[in-house]
Image (spheres, grey):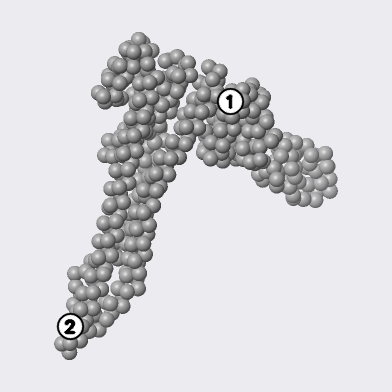
């Protein structure tokens, strides 16, 4: 039920304003006409109090946490319990104690009741179910193997959360040091430095090098930081404008792949998703053409996705998987050897699983190295700033002492 604000006149020409609840604007206008009012203006005011805004829900249905909880329930009911997915969603919509899961299950069940697939229903909640999850569900529905797919989605989400937690944990200490160092620097710059400069000017002492460094850092923070922030905003706007077109977005993604460390992380993440999804879909009984079509959509980098599209076309034309991967430079020689052995032995599922595990491990190492380097840089910068300011204060005190002694 939505809420509408109206402005209307009665039979005597008296203008009245107010609001009413109605399913849509047409129903609201009919209600006003039935009350003997002539509608002058009518506009939506959102949902009425206590009502569920379905469009808002479809944008934000709870995120990854709700997705994990819902898929775990579906795995229990559909996988081990043997219940049809429609009945499972209906049961969760009626009996779940979690209001978010209950509402999400109700929305999914409503779409299933209209004849839509579960994958199509999940795509309405992009903040909750990402592309990899929906592709897995689509494959599970086509092979009638949703229980296996739900287990893989759970493992995928748990692994992603574990990796994210490791990144946050690694960055927590450097961020704390940076905040602490920034606080100390601000204390020195805006409280202690003016007093020291005033004392040195009164005593006729010359400014030492650390004091000049402190002044330079202060000017850089006061004038340089806003300039750098404005430049960053302009660069972000330019990148957003460039990415508004498909060709521009592909160029940006291609440039990202060339950045040291970051490019390797992005590439490993996409290959890991592609290999994991390919292994899962193949194990579910999906043919190679459909497997690579669905797995290709899980690649977020557009430059890599374009190359994987060429790879998929070559495979559809009859080229060996390993040869096509090598032709378009998607994997290194060691990975190509793994895929080639899998092709010869008829065990591509194991080959892609091995690739997924290998690139997942490489991804963790790259992220660990990046966070370690970032932490070291943050720690070094913090200690350098504190050293400069501390030495400036000590040398200033010594200089003042010498001036007093000379007088």
Looking at the picture, does residue 330 appear above or below residue 205? above
Cα distance between the residues tagged 2 and 1: 83 Å
Residue underneath mark 1: 80
Which residue is pictured at 81% across the width and 46% down the height? Answer: 10
Q: Earlier in the sequence, mark 2 or mark 1?
A: 1
Looking at the picture, does residue 400 appear above or below residue 353? below
Quarter holding residue 306: top left
Query: Residue 342: x percent and y percent?
Result: 33, 17
Residue underneath mark 2: 402
Residue 299 seen by the camera: no
Residue 368 seen by the camera: yes
Label 2, residues with CA under 10 Å away: few <14, some 14-19, many ≥20? few
Label 1, residues with CA under 10 Å away: few <14, some 14-19, many ≥20? few
**Between 347 and 398, the one nearer to me in the picture:** 347
Query: Residue 280: x percent and y percent?
Result: 45, 23
Query: Residue 105: x percent and y percent?
Result: 63, 33
Apparent side of residue 300 relative to residue 188 in the rendered image (left or right): right
Element type where label 1 sits in the image = helix
**Between 387 and 107, the one nearer to me in the picture:** 387
Q: Residue furthest top?
A: 318
Quarter holding residue 53: top right
Apparent side of residue 342 relative to residue 13 in the rendered image (left or right): left
Looking at the picture, does residue 339 appear above or below residue 191? above
**Between 197 and 298, the one nearer to me in the picture:** 298
Q: Which quadrant: the N terminus?
A: top right
Looking at the picture, does residue 198 appear above or below residue 216? below
Which residue is pictured at 26% across the width and 56% down the height? Answer: 380
Which residue is pictured at 65% across the width and 33% down the height? Answer: 92
Which residue is pictured at 83% across the width and 42% down the height? Answer: 36
Kindly indicate whether the residue at mark 1 contacts the one at mark 2 (C-beta within 8 angstroms).
no
Q: Which quadrant: the C terminus?
A: bottom left
Residue 270's disc number:
none
């Amino acid at each position: 039920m939505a809420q509408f604000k109206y402005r209307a006149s009665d039979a005597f020409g008296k203008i009245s304003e107010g609001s009413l609840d109605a399913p849509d604007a047409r129903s609201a206008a009919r209600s006003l006409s039935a009350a003997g009012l002539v509608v002058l203006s009518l506009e939506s005011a959102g949902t009425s109090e206590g009502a569920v805004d379905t469009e808002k829900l479809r944008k934000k249905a709870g995120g990854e946490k709700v997705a994990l909880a819902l898929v775990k329930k579906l795995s229990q009911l559909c996988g081990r319990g043997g219940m049809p997915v429609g009945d499972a969603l209906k049961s969760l919509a009626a009996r779940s104690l979690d209001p978010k899961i209950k509402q999400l299950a109700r929305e999914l069940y409503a779409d299933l009741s209209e004849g839509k697939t579960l994958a199509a229903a999940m795509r309405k909640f992009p903040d909750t179910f990402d592309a990899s999850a929906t592709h897995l569900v689509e494959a599970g529905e086509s092979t009638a193997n949703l229980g296996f797919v739900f287990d893989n989605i759970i493992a995928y989400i748990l692994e992603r959360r574990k990796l994210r937690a490791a990144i946050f944990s690694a960055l927590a200490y450097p961020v704390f040091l940076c905040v602490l160092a920034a606080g100390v620097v601000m204390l020195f710059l805006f409280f202690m430095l003016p007093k020291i400069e005033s004392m040195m000017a009164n005593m006729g002492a010359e400014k030492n090098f650390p004091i000049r460094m402190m002044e330079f850092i202060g000017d850089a923070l006061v004038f340089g930081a806003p300039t750098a922030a404005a430049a960053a905003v302009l660069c972000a706007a330019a990148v957003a404008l460039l990415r508004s077109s498909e060709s521009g977005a592909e160029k940006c993604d291609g440039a990202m792949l060339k950045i040291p460390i970051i490019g390797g992380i992005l590439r490993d993440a996409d290959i890991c998703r592609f290999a994991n999804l390919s292994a899962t879909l193949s194990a579910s009984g999906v043919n190679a053409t459909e497997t690579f079509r669905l797995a290709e959509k899980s690649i977020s980098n557009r430059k890599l996705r374009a190359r994987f599209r060429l790879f998929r076309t070559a495979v559809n034309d009859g080229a060996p998987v390993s040869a096509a991967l090598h032709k378009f430079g998607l994997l290194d020689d060691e990975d190509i050897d793994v895929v080639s052995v899998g092709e010869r032995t008829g065990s591509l599922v194991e080959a892609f699983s091995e690739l997924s595990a290998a690139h997942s491990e490489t991804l963790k190492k790259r992220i660990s190295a990046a966070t370690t380097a970032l932490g070291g840089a943050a720690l070094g910068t913090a200690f350098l700033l504190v050293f400069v300011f501390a030495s400036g204060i000590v040398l200033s005190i010594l200089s003042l002492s010498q001036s007093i002694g000379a007088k």
